[in-house]
Amino acid sequence: MADIDPGQCPQKGQGQAGEESLCWSRPAAETLCTLILAHGAGAPMDSPFMNEMAERLVACGVAVVRFEFPYMAARRVDGTRRPPNSQGQLLDHWRQVYARVRQQVTGPLAIGGKSMGGRMASMLADELRADGLICLGYPFHAAGKPEKTRVEHLAELRTPTLILQGERDALGSRDEVANYRLAATIRIEWLAAADHDLKPLKRSGFTHTQHLQHSAEAIAEFLVPATAAGLF
């Protein structure tokens, strides 16, 4: 794995299939916590959403490390869209990335991601003994299939967890999530009138920028004070 600065995330056609690059975004001042942030199923680690979240988190004192799952790294090389790797492959890749970053970070290390990336992280958080878990738009059930839930492991999750969720998320709205059994370690921050990408309805009076900024501040407040107090 190679380490690269945030302004040098590999572009389409760069790199080789199977190679892994870690994209670091570090605060100019002291780093209070590091968060490994995985992308969702359909967009890469340097999508506008991922770039903006990393930038806002860094401004709040949180260092961000991004990476790509094998199928997305292959798309970067040849431009061909592929479905995500199997769950087992995604989890194994998460383990490899975490081990790599853990070698380079001496302080608290949290994991998480956008949608699928966060879901995979949630399945490993306890195993890896991560210092925290952050999910941006958790896919509580399959698209269009509310009966196919993805919550069983969340009932016993021991890792301190923060989920940023849109109230009208098609993969888990506020009304739907109210019916799930979730561990006491999980805190959900609901974003008014927002969808799976945390975008609110225009008539709500909120903007996407406001929701992203609020999410970054909520993540920092969740991770940093607990870190300073030695709670992780």
Image (cartoon, rainbow, N blue to C red):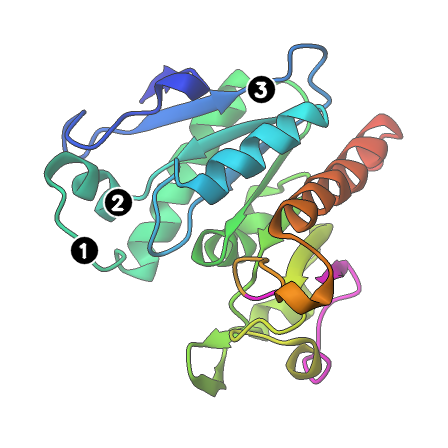
What's the amino acid at mark 3?
Val
The spot of residue 198 in percent (x, y) is 59, 58
Is residue 232 visible to the viewer in this orientation of the structure? Answer: no
Q: Secondary structure at mark 1?
A: loop
In magenta stretch: residue 36: no
Q: Which residue is mark 3?
A: 105
Checking the image for residue 82, the label placed there is 1
Residue 21 in view here: yes
- Tell me if mark 3 has few (under 14), some (14-19) or many (20+) residues whose alpha carbon lies within 10 angstroms of its own: few
Sequence order check, earlier mark of 1 and 2: 2
- Is the stretch drawn in magenta largely helix, strand or loop? loop
Q: Residue at x 65, y 83 (%)?
A: 176
Mark 2 and mark 1 in contact (Cβ < 8 Å)? yes
Residue that carries the numbered disc 2 in the rendered image: 72
Q: CA distance from mark 2 to mark 3?
A: 25 Å
Callout 2: helix, strand or loop? helix
Vertical position of residue 159 compared to residue 66: above or below: below
Mark with earlier residue (3, 1): 1
Q: Does residue 186 show up magenta in the picture?
A: yes
Which residue occupies the foreground of this view, 206 or 58?
A: 206
Q: Residues within 10 Å of mark 1 (few under 14, many from 20)?
A: few
| Residue 230 vertical position relative to residue 144 in the rendered view, above or below | above
The quadrant of the rendering that contains the N terminus is top left
Q: Nearer the viewer, residue 221 or 56?
A: 56
Residues in magenta, as a range: 178-195
Residue 120 location in percent, x, y?
46, 55
Spatial distance from mark 3 to mark 1, Cα to Cα?
A: 32 Å
> Label 2 is placed on what type of residue?
Met
Mark 1–mark 2 distance (CA, rounded to whole Å): 7 Å
